[in-house]
Structure formats: structure tokens, C-alpha cells
Amino acid sequence: MEAAVVVSASRGALGVLLGKLSNLLVGKYKLLKGVRGEIMFLKAELESMYAFLERMSDAEEEPDQQAKCWMEQVRELSYNIEDSVDEFMLCIEREPNSKPRGFRGFIEKSMEFLTKINTRHRISKEFQGLKRSVMEVSERRMRYKVDDIVTKPSHTAVDLRLLSLYAETTGLVGIDGPRDELVQLIMDENSVTAQQLKVLSVVGFGGLGKTTLAKAMYRKLEGQFQHRAILSVSQKPNIRKIFRNILSQVGFVAPEHTNMETWGDDEVIITLQNFLTGKRYFIVIDDIWDETAWNIIRCALPETMNGSRVITTTRIDTVARVCCSNQYDYVYKMKPLTEQDSRKLIFSRVFGSEDACPPYLHEVSAKILKKCGGLPLAIITISSILASKQSKLKGQWEHVLSSLSSNFEVNHTLEGMRQILNLSYISLPHHLRTCMLYFGIYPEDYTIEKNDLVRQWVAQGLISRLHGRDLEDVADGYFNELVNMSIIQPVDTDPNNEVLSCRVHDMMLDLIVQKCREANFVTVIDDLQAIAGLPNKVRRLSLYLDGVIDDTVLGTTQLSQVRALARFGTSTYAPPLLDFKHLRVLTLEFPSGNHEPRIFDLTGMCHLFQLKYLKIVAYGEIALPRKIQGLEQLETLELRISSMVAVPTDVVNLCQLLHLVIPQVTQLPSGIGNMKSLRTLREFSLGLNSVDTIRDLGHLTNLRDLQISSFAGVQLDDVEKGQRMDVLRHSLEKLCNLRYLRMDPYLPNICRDALSSMSASPCLLQRLHVWCMLSRVPKWIGELHNLYDLELVVEVLDDFGILAQLHSLLHLKLHVEATLKDKVTICGSGFPVLNHFIISYIRISNLTFEAGAMPKLKRLEVRFNEQYGAAPVGIEYLSGLTEFSVSNGGYNAEESSRSVSQSALRNAMDMHPCRPAANINRRGNWQYLRRFDDDGFSWRKYGTKNVIGARHPRHYYLCAQRKDCKARKYVQATENDPLLFHVSYFGKHSCAHSAQPRPQRAQGQSFVSKGSVQRMECDSTRNSPTGDMMHRDADYWDNCGFF
């Protein structure tokens, strides 16, 4: 019998343990002859136990309590034995192989011999103890006749709360009618209260689609409100976080050097009140659980007479009435789906359309829908199960029907909802059940990055190597299966529709945590005092800590056996790592809060010999050990911190390290060419790293993900920068396994042709984001036949020929300064699968689409400047277009030319056969600029700062026209689009310019660019500039970003 070499929730570490026991009987471990018999006995007994656990886990009926108790004892025993085996293997592997000579060598050898004897004697006694423990558990199995247990039926009842988990995946089935009804109710302009603040509350138990309805109304009305926000509250609301979220969405921009994270409740409430006073706003507040939370939120929403609207959702009637100030007309009680909508929902998800259901399934499907009672989430859960099986077999439908409890027709309880959620769980194979339970380590409403999750699965031993496939590739497949089964909700996807991050609905998380508790798989703690009362050894510990923490309780708790430790919350408390010994996964997240930046001491982690995954997120500094070579199992090292970090010099000796993520301003030690296994490297600084280190980059031929930051904050002359770029080019030519390459925007003019002259391309590249400006489209890009995502900035576009031949390209984002002929034509051939095209241009007078161009294009976004260019022509030829967005701006443009431009675009939309949704924006007296520095003033860069929680650094500039000028500004790439920049101005210009400067905002104000080019508000007291831009020195241009 060959066990699957994985850790699972139902079988514990038995699968992995049996493999390790086999290793102890061969090779270098066979020297321990004294315990060979004990090891063979353990292996034989555990194999028998494994087979029994496997049989019980595969049984359709649920085992009785006595069997569950015995299974739990076996799981715990397997963990204990594996810990002992790991320590023994470590002792053997660390025994020196050298043979010392001379008298001193004789003494050392004698001491080593005595130490080895003592160690092996201790290990022998430990194995004898383990043998006794296994015998006791085995005898208990025989004594209580566990093999003869009578299983009880487990017709899993349907838990109605599950439905809210999948509310957003219902499409909009049954939503249009209620949405339009409620929009008419709250937006009735003929009402005498039309200008008053109105609050509408949607109420109903989980799963009826409250969130879906509220979001549908938000999408319907958002265009009518300049200040709007949508957010979720949850059961344990963080009030300050809620208010900061609202402020960020409604358009509030904090003054420079202001950290909103440090604001108290009163300050955030007053700020929000003041900002919304006199404004017309629209806010959707989802999932309110108690009156207190609403009363606090309500304090920050001023009573305006501008027609403001608020929508809330809740499961509790009394909360709904309080939200609406007992105006019952504005309490909407959710209704179940009609019979017709229910049929449409389940048949479309299982068969693709309502009409595709075979006649012989009509009767059984009607019975299933009757049990679901019009609950969208129940229908979606069941349809997901049916769609993943042989959906046209009547037996499968009847099996699902029998799994639904008979009382579901009349009992819409929360417990019933959990039962239907459990039906989705038990339909999973064992390996997916374990992966699903691992979500219990994350807090509620947490956005989980897929890469983080699959790497932790691998580090925990939850993934089995299938047919020689890479473990992370197998884990990727597991993740996608959970997405397809609607177990988790996608959050971010890439252009290839690959899910990059997800969330777990709170109802699903409730079930997961419950099952984790039953299997002692993950222990979730939000109060350290609760650890002392836990009945079992903690195997995986998730701490969600807020406020001041009393850490004395941990001193009385045994934690050495913990395998995964995850720490979340706003507290600065860090568990003492010396208390842990067998950690495989360590995640410590210290988000910014009401505290000053501090130093987090991680120097005590050198003894974690099993550590494979380490991720630190911190506001402040972290102190790492000077040497970490003892962490020889480490596969992932991710440091997301707000300051520089000294990477231990021996990190280059970690031969199993696969993923290295470090802050942008970090210098790597020499010798990175030894890290042959490395697959991910973020961020690699061209300025801070030496030329030799850049050269060593070319030796990392297993790299798949590479993100390169520029020379920002480093003083180098043009010769040094050019040398680094030449070496980088040669290194990139050797990275044959690269899938994703990102280049930051800040590169000097002298470096822009280096990337264009590459003689060989990373032929497996799938995603390429080159945000630094290139002179032209490099020819080697045309060789990237696997490329599906391309973002590129070029100074001159000769033609689209190179890009058009990319037959896998799905997403193209392109910024063009100008063209040779001042005109671009996209021909009817090429771009066979492109579905999303974003283009911004400055000096292109004509962009034309010919008939047959981009046949699969669905979304088109165009941004141009009316002073230099014109609206695109031929949009009606884009046959597959469903969404079209255009943004144009320009100073003092003639109103007639504006009208003509907009009229031509709208006529093109009217002529289009598909009548795509159009969004044509004229920004009034707003100007699209070529570069974030193109505001008519000369600027000198004086600093760069990494901002906690931000992906990109902030750059600071002083006016360079005169030394005593007080004007300054900072520039920072936006989070979602690094080609867009947020620019804030401070101080007034006291210098005299030879050229009339471009308009700027008032002192202390800022703006965020819209589209791929920056915009600035026009000051009517100043004239628009004429002529070319004034000259700027080369060093300044080195630090400019481009759109």
C-alpha cells in the first residue's frame, strides 16, 4: 500500500509520515540500528491505520462519535510522530562528515562521539515511547470495536445562509424588476422630499441576493452622483477603516504628510461630515449587523438638501427599520426567486440555457427547486455540484435531491443554510477539502492572493505530485477547481481570465472554521486568553489581534508543535518566535494603525529548521538574522515593508528558495547567480545593485516572474546607467523561462534603446509591462507568440505591424507620443483574439480603424488631447465591440470643434450594429499632458519615499527655476495603473519664467490623472501656454515618468 504523500484534514500527517519512515530504513539513516525494529513496527501499524482512515473518509455515511474520537487520536499521533522523525533526521543530516586529524582532532572526534551516543540514546527512547503510544491507540481500536461501528445516515440538510455567498454569481436573474422599482422609489423627482437625504434598507436572510440587488442599483445610479461609495461592514466592523474607505471613494484627498491611519474616530467622522456637507452623495453600505454600527456611521452622513441617497443591506428587521428612521416605505424585504427565474438560473448554469434541459429531468429538477424555495445561493450551489458531474444523468440529480433535508421546504433557518453549504463541501475530493479548510487561516473579508495561497499549500504538504508535475502547478489547478465549484469568489483576474485573488464569503468561512475546529486543523484566536483553554495541541494558529495585547498567557501554552502561524490585525504584538519549533509557514502582517513605525525583531527565527514560507508585511523596520542559511527548507521569502531591509548575505546559499520578494529600495548581496532555483524576483533595483549582480541575473534561468525597478533615488551618471542597461539586456536574453516581466517607468533617455536591441527574446513570455518609454516598438516583441498581456509606452509608432502579428494577444495597453506620419491606421488583418484595447496618444492627428480590424475586440478605451490629435475614425467597423470609452481634453478648444468631435463619436456609436455601451467624456478645461512634469515649470527631484501600503514610491520635486522659489510637488503612480500619476502641488511660485507656465492647482491641492495621461484643472486667471516646452537638463529627464 502506497499512501498519498500529503497532509490532509481527515488523515493528518499519516501520508507524509509513512514516506519518512520508509526513508529512515534506507540510506544514511539506516545507521541507527537500535531503533530499526521500532520504526518497522510503527510503519506497519500506521499503514493499517491509514487504510482505515481512508475507508472512513470515503464512506458516504458519517461515522459515529466514537469513530470520530478514534480518528482524531490517530491524526494527533501522526503529527507527534512526524515532529519526532523530523528532529531525528535533522540530527543525522547535520552530523559533520569531515575527519579531524591530530590530537585536537582526536579530542573533537571523541566529544562528537559522546554527543552522538547521547543523542541517539535519547532518540531511541523517544521512538520506544512513540511505539507505546501507537500500541495504545491500536488496542483502543480493538477494545471498542471501531471497525464494527454502525454509521448513521447523513442526508445533509440545506443551510440557507449559503446563498449569500454566491449572490454575485447569479447574473441578474430576477433582479431587474426590484431594481427598477426601488430606483423609482428613491429617485422620484416629483416627490416633495426629492431633495432630502433618503435611506433605503434592503432586508432579508442570507442568500436572497441583498448585495446583488444593492450593487445593481449602484451601477444603475452611480453616473448621477459625483461623490459615491460602496462598502461592506461585516459582523465585527472596524469603524475607522469604514470611514477611511468612504473618504477615499467619495474623492477626499488628505493633505501632504498626513497619515489618516493615525486618526481617531472623532477626527475621521468630522472630516467625512465636513467633506460631504453641501455635496450630493450616494453610498451603499452592505451587511450591517447591529444598530450601534449604523448609528455611528449615520453620524458622519450630513443631512444635505441636494438629493443624496444611501442604501443599506442587513439580515435583521430591527436594524433595517433603524436605518430608515422607521419610515417603513423605505424598507424593502427581499423576495425569493420566482419559479420561472429559478428554472432559468439552474438550467443556464448546468446546461447553458433554460431550453437545454432534457425532458426526463423536469420532474426531479422541479423537486430540487421546490426544496431550494427560490433561494439563489442554494440554487447556485446545487447547480455547481451538478455541472461538475455528469449533469444529464438522472441518478446524479436524484442523489442531490436525497441529500436535501425534508424540512427545507418549511424551515428557512441559518442552520439549514449551513447544511447546504456542507453539501458543497462533501462533494469535493479529499485533497480539495483540505485545501478548502486552509482558508480558515485567513480573517473575514480578507483578499487572498492566489500565489500566496498555493505556496502555503505546498509548504504545508497539502499538494501531491501528480505524474511528475510541478507542485505549484498542481496547486494552481486545485485553486481553479475551487473557483469553478463556486467555493471561493474571484476578486482580481488577468486578461486571460485567470483568477489572481479571491475572497471567502463569511458564511462559507463560518463553516470552514467550524470544520477546522472539529478536525483540529486550524485554530482561530482573536483573544490570547482563549489559547490557555484549548483542549488539543494547536497545529495551525491564526491570530487576529487588535489593541493592546497581554502576552503573558503565551508563556503557559505549548506552541512548539504549531506548523503554521498567521498573525493579522492592527495590534503591534508579535508572538515570540522562540516558542515555536516546527513552523512550516510564518505570516506576520502588521498593517499601519494608530502607532508609530517600529522595529519588528525577527532575529530569533534561525532555529525554524522546517520553515518553508515566510511573509512579513510591516509598517516600520524589521530586523532579520545576520545569517539565515539554517533555514535550508525555505522556499518563499516575502518582505513587504515600508523601509529598506538588510537582506542576509547568505540568502544566496538557500538552494531551495523559489520566490524572493523584497522592497524596491533593497540591495541584494553578491552571488545571486547561485540561486538557480529562483522563480520569482521582485523588486530588482537597477540603481542599488552592482553591475556584477545585474550580470548574475542572467544565471537565474528558472525565473518566471521578474519585476525591475529603475534608478530612482540613486545618483549615477549616464555612463553608469548605460552600462547597467547593457548588462541587463544581456541578462534578459538568457532568461528562457520568463513568463512575466515588468519594467518601472523611470528610465533615462540614454537607456531607452537598450531594451529595443535585444538579440533574443524570452520566448515563453506571457505578460509584458514595459512602463518606461521606448523609442519604438522593439522587433523582438513580435517573436512572443505566447504573449497575451502587453502594456507599452513608445515615443514613436511606425505602424502596428509588429503588434498585430501577436496571435495570442488579448489585452493591449499602448501609449504613443507621436508617429512618423502623424497618422495611424489599424488594418483589417492582425490582432485575431484581442478583446481589450487601451490607447492614449498625444500628437496623432488621425487614428483610423479599417473594416475587419480587431474582429474579437469587445472593449475599446481611447484617450487623446484635442490640441494635438483628433477622435478615432472607423469605430463602426469593430464588429464585436460591446463597450467604448473615450476621454479627451484641451485648453481653450473651440466649442464648435468639441461639439463636432463628440457628435462624430456618437454617430459612430449609432451606426454600430451592436450599439455598444458608450462613455464619451469631455473634460472641459482640462488638459492631458505628455508627462507628469509637463506643466510649464522646471523641476528638480530631491527625494524618493516608499509609502506603506502603496505599490509605487513617491517622488518629491522643487522648483528648479530659482533656488528661493517655495513651490514644490510630489508625484506618485496610482495603485491600479502605474502609467497614471497622482500629482500634488504645494507652495506658490515666486520665480519668473521666460515662458508662460501651464495652469496649476491651488496651493495644497492635488489631482489624480484620468485615463493614461495626466490632467490638470485650468485656472481661468491664467493663459494656456504657447510654443514648445522649455529645456530641461538631462538629469531631470532621467527621473520622468511617462503615460
Image (spheres, rainbow, N blue to C red):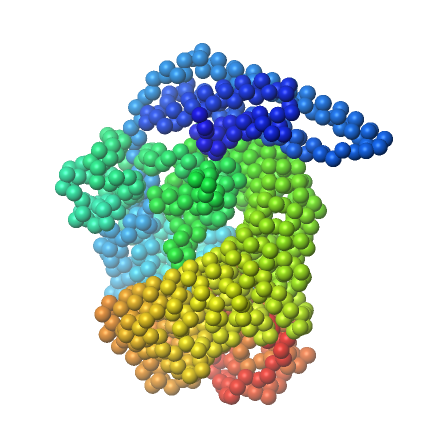
> Is residue 638 visible in the rendered structure shown here?
no
Q: Is residue 263 left or right of residue 604?
A: left
Q: Nearer the viewer, residue 549 or 1038?
A: 1038
Q: Is residue 947 left or right of residue 453?
A: right
* Number of callouts: 0
Residue sitting at x 27%, y 59%: 183
In the image, residue 1004 lies at what x, y percent?
56, 71
- Residue lying at the far right in this picture: please name it: 103
Residue sitting at x 40%, y 73%: 801
> Is residue 471 visible in the rendered structure shown here?
yes
Above or below, comparing residue 68 to residue 234 in the picture: above
Residue sitting at x 44%, y 80%: 819
In the image, residue 13 lies at what x, y percent?
50, 29
Residue 996 found in image quarter: bottom right
In the image, residue 689 lies at what x, y percent?
65, 60
Quadrant location of the N terminus?
A: top left
Q: Is residue 377 left or right of residue 455?
A: left
- Residue lying at the far left in this picture: please name it: 359
Q: Nearer the viewer, residue 620 or 240?
A: 620
Above or below, comparing residue 308 to residue 620 in the picture: below
Q: Nearer the viewer, residue 980 or 113?
A: 113
Q: Nearer the viewer, residue 474 or 937?
A: 474
Residue sitting at x 50%, y 47%: 452
In the image, residue 139 lies at what x, y percent?
48, 13
